[in-house]
Amino acid sequence: MNYLLRGTSVVTAVGVFSLLTFSLPSGEAHGDGGGNVLPRTINQAWQQECASCHLAYSPAFLPQASWRRLMNGLDRHFGENASLDPATQADILRFLEANAADRGGSRIGSKVMKRMPAGEAPLRITDTRWFVHKHDEVSQSVWSRKSIGSTAHCAACHRQAEQGVFDEDTVRIPKQ
């Protein structure tokens, strides 16, 4: 009887340990860059200024050098003058650099950098080899649909883009 009790105790202890170890919330299941979910990194100035015109694109989509180029050219930001006061610009740039693709903070950032040629610093996320590879099955006619408009309109198909979710299972391509 003593062996039965001891065996039951061991099995129970292993079961409880396993349950606790494998069921506790892991960062990757909750948006720290695991799979196709980006970290929920937030900077108030970035959110306020960038998201006032378009999706506040995750810093993990471009390397630091790209963010530097982009932030240093805000007076000619894709045909618009998006100039900011120097303190706000510096704050946003620090945030972008700290969370950039080449800082290794997310799986998507690592994937972006894996396909990035050394020394390349594209200004557009849509020009990265990673983006082109991920969207290679999307035809030009789909991009030009009225409800999508361009490759830069992530939220048209990735309905949870603002929450950092870019999982292929949640993609819904508009019909028109």
Image (cartoon, grey):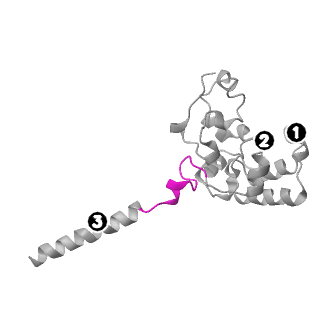
Query: Where are the magenta residues, as a range?
Result: 24-38
Residue to which mark 1 is pinned? 80
Q: In this orientation, does residue 120 appear?
A: no
Left or right position of 81 against 26: right
Front-lying residue, 113 or 39:
39
Q: Quadrant of residue 94?
A: bottom right
Q: CA distance from mark 2 to mark 1?
A: 10 Å
Q: Label 3 belongs to which residue?
A: 15
State left or right for residue 41 relative to residue 51.
left
Above/below status of 9 relative to 99: below
Give neighbour class at mark 1: few <14, some 14-19, many 20+ (Cα, 10 Å): few
> Residue flagged by tag 1: what amino acid is it?
Glu
Residue 53: which disc? 2
- Residues at badges 2 and 1 in contact (C-beta under 8 Å)? yes
- Magenta-colored stretch includes residue 27: yes
Q: Earlier in the sequence, mark 3 or mark 1?
A: 3
Label 3: how many Cα within 10 Å (few below 14, some 14–19, many 20+): few
